[in-house]
Amino acid sequence: MRKITLAHGSGGSLMHELIKDLFVKNLDNPYLNNLGDSALINKNLAYTTDSFVINPIFFPGGDIGKLSICGTVNDLCVSGAKPKYLSCGMIVEEGFDYKDLEKITLSIKKTCKKAGVYVVAGDFKVVEKGAVDKIFINTSGIGEMYQNAMLSASRIRPGDKIIVSGTIGDHGASVLLAREELKFKSRIFSDCECLNGLISSIICKDIRFMRDPTRGGLATTLNEINAQCSYDMTIDERTIPVKEKVRALCEILGMDPLYMANEGKALFIVSPKSASRILSRMKSHPLGKNSRIIGEVEKRKAKKVYLKTKIGGTRILDMLRGEQLPRIC
Amino acid sequence: MKYIDEFRDNKIAKNISRAIFEKAGTSGPVNIMEVCGTHTMSICNFGIRDMLPENINLISGPGCPVCVTPKAYIDRAVALAGIQDTVVTTFGDMMKVPGSRSSLTQERTKGASVKVVYSTLDAVDIAEKNPDKKVIFLGIGFETTSPTVAASLAYAKKKRLKNFFVYSGHKVILPAMKALMEDRDAKIDAFLCPAHVSTIIGMTPYNIIATKYKTPCVITGFEPLDILQGILMIIEQITSKRSEVENQYKRIATRSGNKKALDLLDDVFEIEDSEWRSIGIIPKSGMRLKRKYSVFDVEKNFDLPAIKTRPDTGCMCGSVLKGIKTPFDCPLFNKKCTPEHPVGPCMVSSEGTCAAYYRYPVPQGYGAGRR
């Protein structure tokens, strides 16, 4: 009998198979089938949803409340929309600490205020102990399309530059460490932040496409973009910003920061003539100060992403397959 | 990052690559087997094939512990996970390996208590904290991991733990290398010997490969510069018609190895004939618990029903593990067998040859590096 495994939810190729073969096939409609970060309802409106089931619910740099707002806000803004109104549904396990629920709610309040969005509808359910792991949150959001945005993977051209808005893998590494199974005496701060401020400061027609590399990391997101455009892409490992602590953790566990989740980063494909202008504007924003051009779009049309490695070799960079599991030795 | 970046220096890499081109350019095809799965991963991850001349073939060997663990072992691990009040603990790579009917991941989905641990001592810790549960650790791997398992058993003995057990599927690497040398189909000109295994066993065990089989051995670290230098040392041996055991990984591995670890292994384990998945029985290549540790031995303390293990059909992992075939020769590769739906063990472990070829595709018909 076929069963759903954790790998179906890890953001990699198994999840893509499931979305295509089960959900899109059955729920088939032009808004959904596009499979963007948000659905475009008409030319002015973007709509999206996301669920949050993180363990632990509090981690350095954030908590499940902040995350649930950032996730939906970011999905809207990388679709070229200004996030406006959110809904928030919570499913809580009986016996959950009231203080923690209050802490999460205050964190939602703070994050909404900073991002300039409102939670305008909500739902709250309690289930028997063990039926969920502490608390699950779903948010959905509506945003207004920026009139000066023109985002489409079909506009990507050879020579376009690939920009990442800062260090990668921070969120994945932070949560892994916070689970305390590893017993490392160190903390890594998640990058969990709302990106609407950064994106509204740079949005223009020269940005061809953007995405937030969450689950599955930078490598998986680049492959998703690549699947929608015709051209190969090459990124240079030496230019990809990774925090020392994140690299160290990945080295020890045999994991790859290119596949680690981010919750406050965006990936941009921009026209070559405006790349340096966009980059310098990004760098002047607090959430974009570590932005870098990490690669470019090639002329070839094999639909592959290549990584130029640190030592100067080249290899194909695939999307995440299954879960990332630590190695034996 | 200190102690990492130094071994990934772009300029030095280019210089060594150039030296390899100069020295190997005149010789015919050279088949170098990297015995260890970590080498395979590193070679793929850093795009090292891209920096080598076409006449150098890097062949992946049998040194991926997950890949060579027999299906019958997985079947029994799955059965153990189904026993009430038992917790099966394992390193992450083992979770997805398909047995005859199920994998540990599938069993966990069905509700079995299977926990991924990062160290053997985490398994001991679970046992100490859950005295009402029987905690089993799946002991697989070569001399890199077996000393840590031996240490945990020595600790469990000292603490007189009654609920900690090890299911030993440990293997030793040298008999497999000898078996490859005896195999007429395998065409191996030199070995890139494993870094971490060699820190334990030292240099001397490889002497027989260099002397009896006239095949150069270079103990090599896992960083890209290590690997490039190891390959250069092999090429230098071949062009000057030498076959010696050399040590590129001098900063960690020594001639005599790690005496403390070897003594511990000797105290806990004894050598037995052992089955390697898709290869068969290799004499004196496995490690079982000695009688004085039998209270911790899964094989002595759990009554497992006889399980009929289904053979792998159509899968070429055996020939891949011996370096006779590449994954591209296998009709299942990238068709029926993918990392999401693995058929053979080499696709399951991230260090398996097929998984590495899948994840880091190399040109079809490889051969050697592109240039």
Image (spheres, coloured by chain):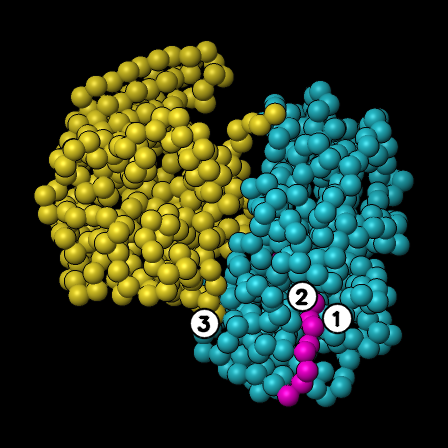
Chain colours: A yellow, B cyan
Q: Are marks 1 and 2 in contact (CB under 8 Å)?
A: yes
Q: Disc 1 sits on a residue from what chain?
A: B
Q: Is residue B219 above or below residue A5?
A: below
Q: Residue at x 63, y 38 (%)?
A: B95
- Mark 1: amino acid: Ile
Identify the element where label 1 is drawn. Answer: loop
SS for tag 2? strand
Span shown in magenta? B26-38
Report how far apart the C-alphas of labels 1 and 2 lie in the structure. 8 Å
Foreground tag (1 vs 3): 1
* Residue at mark 1 shares a chain with residue at mark 2: yes
Would you name the residue on which mark 3 appears? A312
Disc 3 versus disc 2: nearer the observer: 2
Three-letter amino acid code of the residue under disc 2: Ile
Residue under numbered circle 1: B188
Asked whether A122 or B138 is in front, the reply is A122
Q: Amino acid at mark 3?
A: Gly
| Residue annotated with mark 2 | B59
